[in-house]
Image (cartoon, coloured by chain):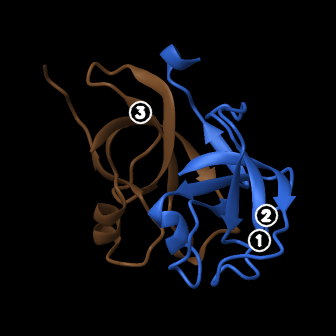
C-alpha cells in the first residue's frame, strides 16, 4: 500500500455492473514525507468515508478489487483506510 | 521477498474491516548493502517488528493472503521476518 492525498471526487453517471454506488475519488500519490509524487489517479473508496484533503492509504492491482463488495469488479486502485497519523523516524542517510 | 527498514507507523481508525486491529508499518525499501531508497510501502506486520529494524517483506498478494489465512483479504504487502544480519 502507498500513501495518497484525496484531491477531488469523481461522479460517474454510468458504471460497470457491481460498481453502482461505489465512491470514486481523485488521489495524488505522496512519498513518505507526504510530498506529491507522480500523477494523480482515480481510486474507488472502500471506506466510503474519505473526502478531499484527507491523507489515505490505497492498494493497487488485484487487491484493489478484493477490497470491494462485490469483489469481482474492474477496479485498479482502492482506498483502504484514512490515516489519522503517521509517526516517522527516517534513517540518517535519508533525511 | 524484499528487504526493508521500518521507518514509521500508521494510525488509522476508519479502514477496510480486514485492517481492523492490524498493525501497519511504513517500510523503506533497502538494498543488500543497507542503503535505503526513496521507495517505500505500507505493510501489515505479522512478526511484531518495530521502527529501525531491518525486515523481510513479501510484496505479492497470494502469498500475503496465505499468511493471513483469508483468500479474500485485500492485502499485498506483509512483513514476515526480522533480519539480524546480511552477509556478502
Give the labeled residue for mark 3: B29
Q: SS class of the residue under badge 2?
A: loop
Residue occupying the point 63% across, 41% down: A87
Check chain identity for marks 1 and 3: say if they share one. no
**Between marks 2 and 1 in the image, the one whose residue lies nearer the viewer:** 1
Drawn side of residue A89 relative to residue A55, left or right: left
Q: Are marks 2 and 1 in contact (CB under 8 Å)?
A: yes
Give the labeled residue for mark 2: A50
Give the Cα separation between the discs numbered 2 and 1. Answer: 9 Å
- Image coordinates of residue B20 in percent, x first then y, are 57, 73
Which residue is farthest left? B88
The chain containing the residue under callout 1 comes to A
Comparing A89 with A45, the one in front is: A45
Quadrant where the C terminus of chain B is found in the figure: top left
Task: Identify the image quadrant of residue B34.
Answer: top left
Q: Earlier in the sequence, mark 2 or mark 1?
A: 1
Residue occupying the point 79% across, 70% down: A49
Image colour for chain A is blue
Check chain identity for marks 3 and 2: say if they share one. no
**Which chain: brown?**
B
**Between marks 1 and 3 in the image, the one whose residue lies nearer the viewer:** 1
A72 up-or-down from B14: above or below: below
Q: Are marks 1 and 3 in contact (CB under 8 Å)?
A: no
The chain containing the residue under callout 2 comes to A
Task: Identify the image quadrant of residue B72.
Answer: bottom left
Q: Which mark is residue A49?
A: none
B74 up-or-down from B6: above or below: below
The chain containing the residue under callout 3 comes to B
- Image coordinates of residue B37 in percent, x first then y, are 46, 24
B1 up-or-down from A73: above or below: above
A90 up-or-down from B4: above or below: above
Give the labeled residue for mark 1: A23
Amino acid at each position: 500500500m502507498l500513501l495518497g492525498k484525496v484531491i477531488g471526487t469523481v461522479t460517474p453517471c454510468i458504471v460497470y455492473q457491481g460498481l453502482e454506488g461505489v465512491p470514486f475519488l481523485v488521489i495524488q500519490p505522496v512519498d513518505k514525507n507526504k510530498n506529491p509524487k507522480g500523477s494523480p489517479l482515480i481510486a474507488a473508496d472502500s471506506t466510503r468515508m474519505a473526502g478531499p484533503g484527507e491523507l489515505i492509504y490505497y492498494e493497487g492491482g488485484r487487491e484493489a478489487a478484493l477490497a470491494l463488495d462485490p469483489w469481482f469488479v474492474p477496479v485498479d486502485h482502492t482506498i483502504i483506510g484514512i490515516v489519522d497519523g503517521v509517526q516517522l523516524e527516517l534513517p540518517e542517510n535519508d533525511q | 521477498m524484499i528487504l526493508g527498514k521500518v521507518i514509521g507507523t500508521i494510525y488509522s481508525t476508519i479502514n477496510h474491516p480486514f485492517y481492523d486491529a492490524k498493525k501497519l508499518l511504513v517500510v523503506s525499501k533497502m538494498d543488500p548493502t543497507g542503503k535505503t531508497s526513496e521507495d517505500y510501502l505500507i505493510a501489515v506486520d505479522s512478526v511484531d517488528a518495530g521502527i529501525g529494524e531491518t525486515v523481510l517483506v513479501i510484496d505479492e498478494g497470494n502469498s500475503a493472503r496465505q499468511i493471513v489465512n483469508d483468500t479474500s483479504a485485500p492485502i499485498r504487502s506483509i512483513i514476515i521476518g526480522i533480519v539480524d544480519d546480511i552477509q556478502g
